[in-house]
Image (cartoon, helix red, strand yellow):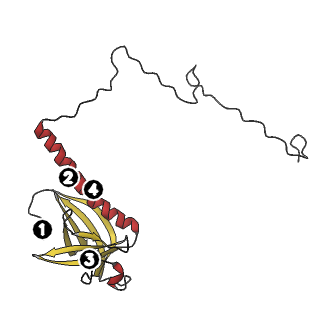
Amino acid sequence: MSLTDDQDYESVLLIIRECYVYKVPPLASSRGHRAQDWGDVDEPLWRGRLRIIAQGKKCFIRLEDGQTGELFAVCPYEENKGCVESVTDSSRYFVVKIEDQGRHAFLGLGFLDRSHAFDFNVALQDHFKQLAAEQRSEEQKKAGIQQPKLDFSLKEGQTLNLSIAGASGSGAGTSARRNRPARPAASGEEGGKL
């Protein structure tokens, strides 16, 4: 199964070696999904590897077998389209919308560590921030707007003086050394004898 028909190269944005998939019951209220409603989270429907792949302007969340790489599910991710939603009762769980041949389903996605969930969120956000920056750059090029180039070179006759803390002003290679204060003798000691 090809991710897209485009000839753009694939870029792996994130790999998480272990993630969990859960069966998600229908949404009961407008409050959002809750991981607590999924039953025992220690008994997932599936375990495997998660990879976030960017191909051109498209982004895919792939759930694969950790050993064989066999594809379990793909979530084509589009920003602000409800493809990935955080659950309301945990920072480690999400609901993802997977698609296959025009049909879609919602699955629960969980991570062992909060740091993995954070990395998952950041990788998705960074992909679209990068696309937005590229688009702004292209628009500026088309409009003929150029960023001013800064010249930090020294002009003829200019000098640069640096003051480095702790270095003595005269003589190269010498270093200023602080003398340590003498250790005071404790009461009852004579000249440091024990």
Asked if residue 55 is positioned above or below residue 144 in the image, the reply reads below
Residue 115 position within the rendered picture, expressed as x and y whole percent measured from the top left:
39, 65
For label 2, the crowd category at 10 Å Cα-Cα, with few meaning under 14, some 14 to 19 and many 20 or more, is: some
- Cβ–Cβ under 8 Å for marks 1 and 3: no
Q: Is residue 103 visible from the viewing direction of this image?
A: yes
Residue 3 located left or right of residue 185: left
User: Residue beneath label 3, please?
Assistant: 30
- Cα gap from disc 2 to disc 3, whole angstroms: 32 Å
Q: Earlier in the sequence, mark 2 or mark 1?
A: 1
Q: Which mark is residue 126?
A: 4
- Cβ–Cβ under 8 Å for marks 4 and 2: no
- Cβ–Cβ under 8 Å for marks 1 and 4: no
Q: Amino acid at mark 2?
A: Leu
Q: In which quadrant of the rendered view does residue 175 lie?
A: top right
Residue 137 position within the rendered picture, expressed as x and y whole percent measured from the top left:
18, 43
Which of these two is toward me, 62 or 86?
86
Asked if residue 136 is positioned above or below residue 21 in the image, the reply reads above
Q: Amino acid at mark 3?
A: Ser
- Cα gap from disc 2 to disc 1, whole angstroms: 22 Å
Q: Quadrant of the N terminus?
A: bottom left
Q: Is residue 66 visible from the viewing direction of this image?
A: no
Which of these two is toward me, 22 or 183?
22
Q: Earlier in the sequence, mark 3 or mark 4?
A: 3
Q: In which quadrant of the rendered view does residue 127 lie?
A: bottom left
User: Residue beneath label 2, please?
Assistant: 131
For label 4, the crowd category at 10 Å Cα-Cα, with few meaning under 14, some 14 to 19 and many 20 or more, is: few
Could you say whether the residue bearing mark 4 is in a helix, strand or loop? helix
User: Residue beneath label 1, please?
Assistant: 2
Q: Residue at x 41, y 18 (%)?
A: 159
Residue 74 located left or right of residue 101: right
Q: Earlier in the sequence, mark 1 or mark 4?
A: 1
